[in-house]
Image (tube, rainbow, N blue to C red):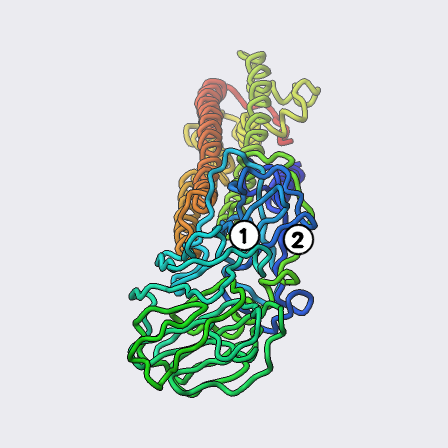
Amino acid sequence: MQRVLTLLLLCLGLSVLGPARAETGWWQTDWKYRKPLTIDAGPQGAGLGAGAGRMPVLVRLHTGNFAFDGVAEGGKDLRFIAADGRTVLNHQVEQYDADLGIALIWVDVPAVNPTAQTVWMYYGNPKAPASGNGQLVFDPDYTAVYHFAGKGAPAQDTTAYANHASGTFTPLDGAVIGRGAQLAGTPLQLPATPALAVPAGGPLTVSAWVKPAQAGPVQTVYVRRDGAHGLLLGVDNGVPFVQVDQTRSAPVPALASGQWSHLALTADATGVVLYVGGREAARVAAPLPALAGPAQVGADVASPEAGALLPPAQPFIGAVDEVRVSKVARPAGLLRAEALSQGAASRLTAFGPDEQNAGVSHFGFILKAMPVDAWVVVIVLALMLLLSWTIMLAKGRYFGRMARANAAFAAQYQQVAGQPAAALQDRARTGALGEDVRQASSLWRLYAIAMDELGGRQAHAHGLGAAALAAIRAAMDAEVIRENTRMSQRMNWLSTTIEGAPYVGLFGTVIGIMLVFAVAAMAGAVDINSVAPGMAAALLCTAAGLGVAIPALFGYNWLAARAEAIGADMAVFVDEFSARLAEEYDAAGATPPVLHPVRA
């Protein structure tokens, strides 16, 4: 029976833990809907051929993949959660227009690899505050990022460096990413801030989407001058090139007329590399000179000191979009990913069906947020709980059965008061003292031991001496000790559970909190939505430890009290029966009758 009880408790525990772990719960129950986004850089997706690392991924929503129903005004309730279901990914809403059915959102994905990964987009919480922040989406090595999302306003830098450009442009709807800038000879001037300064031979990355309106000689896409030195990214009669002072890259195929093309350059101590469409097109084996002056986009404002090192270039006639400047040389994989994923035909992101929250309790939300280390601690505590409850239930049944049998024996014992001590033997043989009593009663076992000891001394026809009575009492005392030992078996596990379970839970809490802060620091997210679920899951370990220890404490005290009561009954019976034997078989008179074995 005890084995069956243990098996049932184990199955119950696994049935509780199993679904809780396997359930794909909601990130937060205040959000009614979510949509899975699959980011796949592998052959079935964008086909990048290599990982891009950390990357702002463009999520392009339209009526073909999203209904725009249930979203708060301006998309302020949009949240993006990593595949683990807990980590909040930073995002920036560049454009959101539910009436037109279009939205452009940049999501900071920590690692874009050939292996597909899922990002959950949550929406449907009208009370949620806006949380989009471009300063967190683009890593600190981006020194300027221009979306041109404003209508006629100066180009705003979305990074934390606030390198806003001066100069006007004509907003262009329907650019490669939402709204772009139409240029017609007026430059967009970037400020000469320390964040944009480049040391001699230093790293740099510049990228932009361009759409030439007409071919012309040496048109300026991006130029940076400092005294007689300079760097120029341009288009010469449709042919993209990069030039450092007087050194220009070799000719490459011309850009397709009237189409958007992605141009980029990277620089390091070995020279400058030109990328067209995300692929390396040409190299210039000349490192950059020191560049601390202002930079221009779309036109060249040559300084008087320019001289012949870098002659003035012509304005760029056409459109530009998504201009970025970095103070590091970005890897080729990232530039390839940008070129392939930011266009309308991108295959990097696939959209799954929308899901509605069926209702998840707060406790279920905490279980979903638990990391692997917390589950290990909870499983250990669950095993401790199952074992302690098995012991308590088995001990409770054992003590209950013994107490009832002792009560039945005591009633029979009282009925033969004043009769010979062997009278209970007759009742046992006639069935008045049931088999269950003789099997479970510790008092009956003491009585049987004493009568067996008397039976072995039938040759003493002149009564029992003090030594014989002492021997009989010693035999009963030995059985009392053995019974107390049986009652205390496995009770030490309960005391271990009482003292150890809270510390096991506390250990899981400490580890969980450490991981929460470490992950938040690595992801650059310190808002309450990213920290609170992990903290709650960590604290659950302590609660689980207390939940294991508290019942064990109550059960231990209750069982100890019952064991003490049974031990007291045995001690009283030994004293009482020893006195009765001494009175009945004293050395002065009585002769012991012939006794029969009485052990059951």
Mark 2 lies on a secondary structure that is: strand
Estimate the x, y position of residue 504 in percent, counting from the top left: 43, 46
Q: Quadrant of residue 294?
A: bottom left
Looking at the picture, which amino acid does disc 1 mark? Ile
Estimate the x, y position of residue 423 in percent, counting from the top left: 60, 18
Q: Quadrant of residue 346?
A: bottom right
Which residue matches tag 2? 351
Mark 1 lies on a secondary structure that is: strand
Can residue 562 be seen? yes
Estimate the x, y position of residue 446 in percent, counting from the top left: 53, 29
Q: Quadrant of residue 29?
A: top right
Q: Give the residue drawn at x 42%, y 42%.
A: 528
Q: Is residue 299 above or below residue 410?
A: below
Which residue matches tag 1? 105
Looking at the picture, which amino acid does disc 2 mark? Phe
Q: Give the residue drawn at x 66%, y 22%.
A: 428
Q: Quadrant of the C terminus?
A: top right
Give the mark nearest the N terminus, 1 or 2: 1
State the residue in front, 464 or 469.
Answer: 469
* Few, some or many residues within 10 Å of mark 1 (<14, 14–19, 20+): many
Q: Give the residue drawn at x 62%, y 69%.
A: 258
Q: Is residue 118 above or below residue 268?
A: above
Of circles 1 and 2, which is in front?
A: 1
Estimate the x, y position of residue 317 in percent, counting from the top left: 52, 69
Can residue 501 be seen? no
State the residue in front, 411 or 524.
Answer: 524
